[in-house]
Amino acid sequence: MSALRDLLVARIAADDAALVQLLGDFVRAASPNPPGDTRAAAAVLMRWLEDCGVPYRLVGPDPAMPNILASFEGGRPGPHLVLNGHIDTFPTIAAERWTQDPLGGAVADGRLYGTGSSDMKQGTASMVALFCWLHAIRDRLAGRLTLTAVSDEETFGPNGARYLVEHHAAEVLGDCLLNAEPGAPTTVRFAEKSPLWVAIEVQTMGCHGAYTHKSPSATKIAAAIIEDLAALEATEVPLPPAVAQAIEAGASEIDRVHLPGAARTMGAVTLNIGIWQGGTLVNMLPGHCRIEADIRLPWGTTPDTILPRIAEIVGHHQGASMQVMSKQTPRWSDPAHPMVGNIIRNAAQVAGWQVRPIPSLAGTDSRLWRERGVPAFTYGTTATNVAMPDEHTDLDEWRKVVRVQALSALDYLTQGRAA
Ligand SMILES: [Zn+2]
């Protein structure tokens, strides 16, 4: 181990109690989104940066949703690494079913409990701490390190990372992104499926429920449309070879982490009817029905190849019309990127974990960097009870993940190359 690695590991060990305190304070400063006022939580991170003597600034269009931006140059030229985490959390789910105070940040049995403790205050705290640790040895690093702690992730809102990549691109895009969303510390995620959201409205005359010969039923037409849409799940998708290989190699780990069936779901188009609303009274024939479909696309297909098929299905049904609510093209970063190698090597050394590069089913802010051509990787702790009662982070696992993240960033800024 090099002297610099020894120095970093010693610093992390020395800050152990302070780091756990930071996470507890961060959890106690509630930042549910919606409504999305993250000022108290951001202040906890700002205090840590100030105590370390690290300059930062707050940017963003909404003062109640501050994004923390900080950056430094190393002692010699090299690649630009960007660290990312979010400050906002889901609102507390079913507070009455928690065994711990959702805003208490208490430690019990080696776990730190609270809303957002897993998604992703642990990861954002570790990115802030990592930034400070590397800032202290910046003269011995190559390249540049930037910290982005953002406030508008949970609702895919416009005021967080999206604002940064659109308004501060030169500062925040860099050569590589490391995002610390939870998942599993035995996987590094290099790709995300992308959502295609479509609203379909069915309008018919409607009438008294006893006179079914008078008008077609909007709810029955919607049911037929849903049955037809299910055919989209059989779409043959030509996955890019690197993605297909990663899914195959990681299949058992994907199914272990996300439950059996996840590996198969990963490479397939999926359909979820998130909303199906119609009818007023049991004895009225509905003249209106609205469905909202959440279609998830794997790599190798795009919204523009699927949308004409949806339009064709909708066009076959009387009174039906469609509107695209949101569409994104699925992206992936190279699973053979040096950062992936760094994480695999350091996870084996620090914790004995065998890490697999795999795609992700759900979305993170990493996609915003991938959309702009920047390789982006997500590596974090096990997601535990996210958006459920008793959300928590296992502190021993977190300590190991913090070290893997830190050493991998250090390796990138001492040996890595800009991709
Ligand atoms: Zn998250």
Image (cartoon, rainbow, N blue to C red):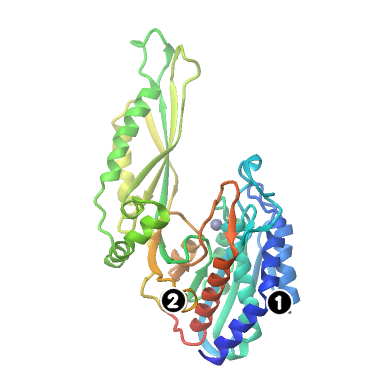
Q: Position of residue 204 (x, y in %)?
A: 40, 21
Answer yes or no: disc 2 within 8 Å of ligand 1.
no
Q: Position of residue 56 (x, y in %)?
A: 69, 73
Residue at which label 1 appears: 55
Tell me which corner region of the image, top left, top right, bottom left or bottom right, holds residue 21: bottom right
Tell me which corner region of the image, top left, top right, bottom left or bottom right, holds residue 248: bottom left
Q: Secondary structure at mark 1?
A: loop
Tell me which corner region of the image, top left, top right, bottom left or bottom right, holds residue 95: top right
The quarter of the picture showing ligand 1 = bottom right
The kind of residue on which mark 1 rests is Pro
Q: Is residue 223 left or right of residue 48?
A: left
Please report the residue visible at 36 percent of the width from the left and 11 percent of the height from the top.
212
Residue at which label 2 appears: 348
Q: Position of residue 146 (x, y in %)?
A: 59, 75
Dot 2 or dot 1, earlier in sequence: 1
Please say if the residues under marks 2 and 1 sit with CB atoms less than 8 Å apart: no
The kind of residue on which mark 2 rests is Ala
Of 283 and 7, nearer the camera is: 7
- Marks 2 and 1, how far apart at CA: 34 Å
Label 2 or label 1, whichever lies nearer to me, is: 2
Please report the residue visible at 43 percent of the width from the left and 69 percent of the height from the top.
373
Q: Position of residue 38 (x, y in %)?
A: 69, 56
